Amino acid sequence: MLDVPVKRTFAPVAVLAAGAFAVGTDAFVVAGFLPQLAASLEVSETAAGQSVTAFAVAYAILSPVLATVTARLSRRELLAGALLLLALANLGSALAPTFAVLLVTRVVAAAGAAAFTPNAGAVAAALSRPEARGRALATVVGGLTVATAAGVPLGGLAGQWLGWRAALGLVAGACVVVAAAVYVILPALPGEPPVPLRVRLRVLRRPAVPAVLALTVLGMAATYTVYAYSAPAMRAVGVESTASMLFLYGLGAVLGNLAAGYATDRWGAGRVLMTGYVVMAASLAGLGWLAGSQDVPVVLVGLLATGWGAGTWCQTPPQQHRLIGVAPGEASLVVSLNASAIYVGIGAGTLAGGLTLAYGVAVTYAAGAALAVLALLLVAATRRV
C-alpha cells in the first residue's frame, strides 16, 4: 500500500469521489438514452446495449495492465490524466458518425476509467486510518453511486432534451473540471516500484483473492442483466419515465453504499454482502413478477427499484475491504482486479440481458434474480474469507 501520512483526508477523498462520479456517469449514462442512440446510429436497442459490453470488456482487460504500466507515475498526475483521457473519449463518442466508431471511442473511455477508479480507491484507503478504511472506500464508490442517482438520470434527460450527443459532450466537460480539481486538491503522492505484471498477478494464487473476485463478477452480472436495458424493463412494469426510476435506483445505490461502508467497519463484510444479495434478488424477482401486469402501482415499482440499487451497490466497499485485508501490500493491484471483475460482471450481465430480452422482460428480470441468488450462495460459502 502507498506509504503516505494519514491526515486531512476529507478534501482528497471527496475529490476522488467526484472523479468517480464523472467516471460512473460516463460508464452508465448510455442506459438512459439507449433508444435514441440506437435510432440515431441505425442499430437495434440490443446491439446498442453492446456498447456497454465493449466498455466493460476493455475495462476488465486494461485495469490490471494499466496498474502495472503506470506504477511509477505520481498518483496525482495519473488520476488527472486519466480523467482528461476520459473527456477526450467522450468527445469522440459524441461526434461518432457510426456505431463502429462509437465502439472504438468507448474502448478509449474504458482505458481512462480503468486508470482512474482502482487507483482512486487505493489512494483513499492509503490516506485513511485502518479502522476507517471501509468508510473511505465507500466515499469513493459513493461517487459511482451518486452517478447512478443523479448523473445517469440527468444524462438521460439531457439526451431527451438536447440529444444523446450533447449529453456525452456534457460528460466530457465534467471530466475536464474534475481533472483540474484532482490536480489542485490531491496531495503529491509517489508511484510504486515497477513490478512485472506476471509477478503482480501471483496474488491470484492466494485462494481468497479469486474467491472474492468471482463473487464480484456474479453480483454485478445479476444487476446488469436488467440495468443495461432499463428503458424496456421499466416499460414492462408500466413506467414510461425511465429517468425517474433510474433516479430511485441511484438513490438506493447511494444509501446502500454508504450504509455498507459503516456496516463493514462495524459488523464485517460477510453480513453486509449476504443482506445485499437478499435485497437484490427480492427486488428483481418482484419487478419480474409485476412485468406485463395491468395498473402496476408506481410507488411499488419505485420501492423495488430503490431496493435493487441498494442491493447492487452495497457490494463494492466490503469486497474491496476483503481484498485489501488479504493483500495489503498489493492494494492498488487487488482493487484494480476487483474493478476488472466489476466490469466483467457488467459485460456478462449486459450480454445475458440482450440474450434473454428476446424472450420477454420477465425472463430478463428472472435471470437477474437467479444470478443474485447464486451470489448469495457463493458469499455464504466464502464469508470467512
Image (spheres, rainbow, N blue to C red):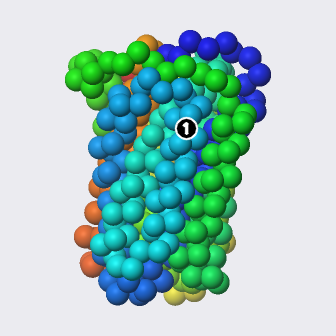
| Number of disc labels | 1
Q: Is residue 59 left or right of residue 192?
A: left
Residue 245 rendering spot, x and y as whole percentages? 60, 70
Residue 63 rendering spot, x and y as whole percentages? 37, 39
SS for callout 1: helix
Q: Nearer the viewer, residue 189 or 215?
A: 189
Above or below, comparing residue 334 to residue 176 in the picture: above
Residue 86 rendering spot, x and y as whole percentages? 50, 53
Please state, as top left, top right, bottom left or bottom right, where the C terminus lies in the image: top left
Q: Is residue 332 left or right of residue 6?
A: left
Which residue is tagged 1? 79
Instruction: Say whether residue 280 is visible.
Output: yes
Instruction: Say whether residue 117 is visible.
Output: no
Q: Nearer the viewer, residue 372 or 106?
A: 106
Q: Nearer the viewer, residue 117 or 238?
A: 117
Give the residue type at disc 1. Answer: Leu
Above or below, comparing residue 91 to residue 328 in the picture: below
Above or below, comparing residue 281 to residue 194 in the picture: below
User: What is the crowding at mark 1: few (fewer than 14 residues within 10 Å), some, or many (at least 20)?
Assistant: many
Q: Is residue 36 left or right of residue 77?
A: left
Residue 215 rendering spot, x and y as whole percentages? 35, 38
Tell me which residue sits at (40%, 48%) in the image: 111
Tell me which residue sits at (35%, 79%) in the image: 98
Above or below, comparing residue 138 to residue 104 in the picture: above
Quarter-of-image position of residue 304: bottom right
Tell me which residue sits at (66%, 39%) in the image: 182
Tell me which residue sits at (46%, 59%) in the image: 89
